[in-house]
């Protein structure tokens, strides 16, 4: 039976933009967690009936005027839940399986030096779960390369190694320490999560990997990522990230390989 008491140490912060047809399903999944956490929805674009929908799922609505980019929306959502010790930036189109919060907080309890916890995930298109793709297998392999079978890594070199060949960490599954001054970059369109994880990797604190798939990431047409691929923005940001880790020739080679992977839709 679900534990109906709310864990004050953890919050789901949901940055909502526009009128997503999937927001209510996301909120329903957060409200159905076996270990209940506070849910905060932050938006600069409220719509009629939004507050009632949010409150119907036990969440609170925070309306702000800081919108204008993904980074601004994410930072506003994190700020709205900043009093929680741990914050999951829950994406409005995604679905969180009932054990997500419980398994994440159990990982925190077993790893007192943790600063960054994430779980495995699967993808959904429409309402159907997508089979494992070559790209998902590759991301899993990159994670294993960094963690080498361990659940926790603390060394800065090991944490950077996880992110050296791309960003295999599923952003919607990440739970961060709250009550801090951490902010996402607001000038990036695609790789603001990769940039953030690289910065966190250089700080004290362990990365913790929960290998169970505990959330479903939704794929849909017309996303910001697809637009960035068409406009060439993603290629520019990918090269910038690889240059943070590798000499320029290697960075350029990896960026070209990365571009081939997502242009092939894998």
Image (tube, rainbow, N blue to C red):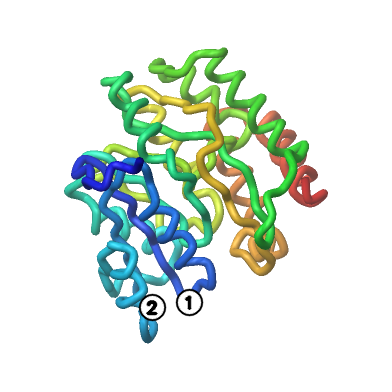
* Callouts 2 and 1 close, C-beta under 8 Å: yes
State the residue in front, 68 or 146. 146
Residue positioned most to the front = 1
Q: Does residue 20 sit above or below 171 in this rendering?
A: below
Q: Judge from the rendering whether residue 213 lies leftward or rightward of residue 100; answer left or right.
A: right
Mark 1 neighbour density, 10 Å: few (under 14) some (14–19) many (20 or more): few
Q: In which quarter of the image is the C terminus?
A: top right
* N-terminal label among 2 and 1: 1
Name which residue lies at 70% across and 40% down: 255
Give percent across and percent down for residue 149.
55, 13
Q: Does residue 140 sit above or below 73 in this rendering?
A: above
> For the residues carrying marks 2 and 1, which lies nearer the camera in this image?
1
Give percent across and percent down for residue 36.
29, 46
Name which residue lies at 26% across and 21% down: 112
State the residue in front, 58 or 122. 58
Which residue, given by chain and number where applicable, does mark 2 sit on?
45
Rendered image quadrant of residue 242 = top right
Q: Judge from the rendering whether residue 153 lies leftward or rightward of residue 80; answer left or right.
A: right
Q: Judge from the rendering whether residue 119 lies leftward or rightward of residue 217; answer left or right.
A: left
Q: Judge from the rendering whether residue 4 lies leftward or rightward of residue 19; answer left or right.
A: left
State the residue in front, 126 or 236. 126
Q: Does residue 185 sit above or below 207 in this rendering?
A: below
Residue 210 showing in the rendered view: yes
Name which residue lies at 56% across and 36% down: 213
Which residue, given by chain and number where applicable, does mark 1 sit on?
19
Q: What whole-number distance in Å separates the C-alpha atoms at marks 2 and 1? A: 8 Å
Give percent across and percent down for residue 95.
51, 53
Residue 180 showing in the rendered view: no
Q: What kind of element bears circle 2?
A: loop
């Amino acid at each position: 039976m679900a534990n109906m008491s709310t864990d004050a140490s953890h919050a789901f912060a949901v940055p909502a933009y526009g009128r997503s047809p999937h927001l209510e399903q996301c909120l329903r999944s957060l409200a159905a967690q076996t270990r209940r956490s506070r849910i905060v929805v932050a938006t600069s674009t409220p719509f009629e009936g939004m507050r009632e929908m949010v409150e119907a799922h036990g969440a609170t609505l925070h309306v702000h005027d800081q919108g204008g980019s993904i980074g601004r929306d994410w930072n506003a959502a994190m700020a709205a839940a900043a009093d929680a010790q741990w914050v999951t930036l829950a994406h409005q189109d995604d679905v969180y399986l009932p054990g997500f919060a419980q398994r994440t907080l159990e990982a925190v309890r077993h790893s007192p030096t943790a600063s960054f916890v994430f779980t495995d995930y699967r993808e959904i298109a429409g309402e159907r779960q997508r089979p494992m793709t070559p790209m998902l297998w590759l991301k899993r392999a990159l994670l294993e390369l960094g963690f080498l079978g361990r659940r926790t890594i603390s060394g800065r070199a090991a944490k950077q190694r996880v992110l050296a060949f791309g960003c295999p960490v599923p952003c919607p599954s990440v739970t961060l320490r709250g009550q801090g001054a951490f902010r996402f970059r607001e000038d990036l369109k695609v790789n603001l999560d990769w940039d953030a994880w690289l910065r966190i990797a250089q700080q004290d604190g362990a990365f913790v990997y929960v290998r169970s798939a505990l959330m479903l990431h939704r794929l849909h047409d017309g996303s910001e990522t697809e637009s960035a691929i068409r406009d060439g923005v993603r290629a520019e940001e990918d090269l910038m990230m690889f240059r943070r880790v590798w000499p320029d020739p290697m960075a350029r080679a990896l960026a070209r390989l990365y571009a081939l992977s997502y242009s092939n839709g894998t």
